[in-house]
Image: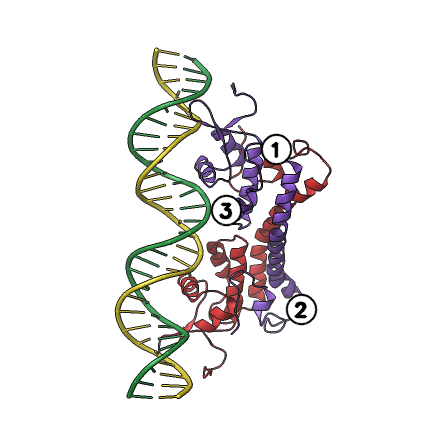
Chain colours: A purple, B red, C green, D yellow
Amino acid sequence: MALEPDDLLAIGEVSHRTGVAVSALHFYEQLGLIASTRTAGNQRRYRRHMLRRISLIVVAKRLGIPLSDVQEVFTSLPLDHSPSLRDWRRVAKLWHAELEQRRTQLDSLQRELTGCIGCGCVSLKACRLLNPEDALGEDGPGPRRI
Amino acid sequence: MALEPDDLLAIGEVSHRTGVAVSALHFYEQLGLIASTRTAGNQRRYRRHMLRRISLIVVAKRLGIPLSDVQEVFTSLPLDHSPSLRDWRRVAKLWHAELEQRRTQLDSLQRELTGCIGCGCVSLKACRLLNPEDALGEDGPGPRRI
DNA sequence: CCTTGACCTCAAGTTCACCTGAGGTATTAG
DNA sequence: CTAATACCTCAGGTGAACTTGAGGTCAAGG
C-alpha cells in the first residue's frame, strides 16, 4: 500500500488519526498552524510530528483557547522537522500561565456550584455569593468600577 | 441617585458590574439566558441574582462551553426569582461531568507539555508521545482506526 | 423646560472556525 | 488501461456570538 518515502502521511490518514476533518486541516494550513510537503502531483504529505501539533490544536480548542493563541505559541516550533525538547519546553512555558488560569476558573466555577452549596449556608444571599464579580475573578473584559 | 424600588439594577449598572457589554446582555436576553422586568418607560431592570447568572455565563464561555449548553442547564433555574439551594444543586450536578471532562483535558494537555518533558526521555519519539491520539484521549470527533 | 446621557428596537455587519460544492487531477487496485 | 477513490483549488455558505448603526425614547440635573 504505502509506497511513500517512509513516514509521510496523506491528508486522509491524518484526518482519520486525529479526528480532524480534511477541510479543517486545509484551514489550519492556511493559518500556518501546520505544514505539509507536496508530492509531484501536488498532494499533501504530512510528517508524523504534525499529528502531535494537531492534537494540541484540538485540545486547546476544546478548552476555549482561540486558534490565534495557538498560532502565537506555535511560532516557536519548527514546521519542517520534529521539534526538539527545547522547543517543547518553550511551548510548555508559554502555555503554563494560560492553562493555570483555565484551571483556576474551573475551580471557581466548581466551588461556586458545589463548594458553596456544600458549605451549609442555607440562603445564597449569605456567603460571598452576593458579589459574584470578585468571587469569580473576572480577568478578560473585566468589570470596571467608576 | 437610585430612586429604584429597591434592588433593581439598570442595564448599564449590570454591564459595569459584570464586564459584559450592554449589547451582549440584550443578546443573552433574546436567548432566554437572562431576564428583566421593565419600567413604565420600557427600560430593563435586573434583579441582583441575575448578576450571578451572568457571571456563570462568562466563566462558562471562557471555558469553551457554548451558550446552548448554558441555556440547557439554566432551564432548571427560575428567571423571576432568586434560585433556591435545590435549584443550584441541580445545576451543579448537571455541570459536574462537563467540568470534570474539561479538567481531565487540561491535565492531559499539561502532562503532554510539562509532565513528559520532565520525565527524562531525551527524544520525544520515545515515551508514549508517538501515538498522541491515545495520549490525549480524544473523545469528541474521535480518531477511528481502520 | 431643556439638554445630556442612558436607554430602546430592529436590521445588518463582523469574526471565528470551519463546511460545502463545483470542477478538475492523482493514485492505485484490478 | 480503467475505474474507483482520494486529493486538489477556489468561491461561497454556515452557525455562533456578538457588535454597530440608525432612528428614536426616557430620566435627571440645572
Classed neighbour count for the residue bearing mark 3: other residues with Cα under 10 Å, few (<14), some (14–19), many (≥20): some
Residue at 65% x, 71% y: name it: A121
Residue at 64% x, 47% y: name it: A93
Residue at 56% x, 68% y: name it: A133
On the rendered structure, is C10 left or right of A77?
Answer: left
Classed neighbour count for the residue bearing mark 1: other residues with Cα under 10 Å, few (<14), some (14–19), many (≥20): some
> Is label 3 or label 2 in front?
3
Estimate the spatial distance between the alpha carbons at disc 3 and disc 2, rounded to whole Å.
42 Å
Residue A13 seen: yes
Q: Amino acid at mark 2?
A: Gly
- Residue that carries the numbered disc 2 in the rendered image: A120
Estimate the spatial distance between the alpha carbons at disc 3 and disc 1, rounded to whole Å.
23 Å
Q: Amino acid at mark 1?
A: Asn
Chain containing the residue with disc 2:
A
Q: Position of residue A48 (x, y in %)?
A: 57, 30
Disc 1 to disc 2: CB gap under 8 Å = no
Dots 3 and 1 on the same chain: no
Estimate the spatial distance between the alpha carbons at disc 1 and disc 2, rounded to whole Å.
46 Å
Q: Amino acid at mark 3?
A: Leu
- Residue that carries the numbered disc 3 in the rendered image: A67
Q: Is residue D27 placed above or below A111 in the rendered structure? A: below
- Residue that carries the numbered disc 1 in the rendered image: B131
For marks 3 and 2 on the same chain, the one whose residue lies earlier in the sequence: 3
Classed neighbour count for the residue bearing mark 2: other residues with Cα under 10 Å, few (<14), some (14–19), many (≥20): few
Chain containing the residue with disc 1:
B
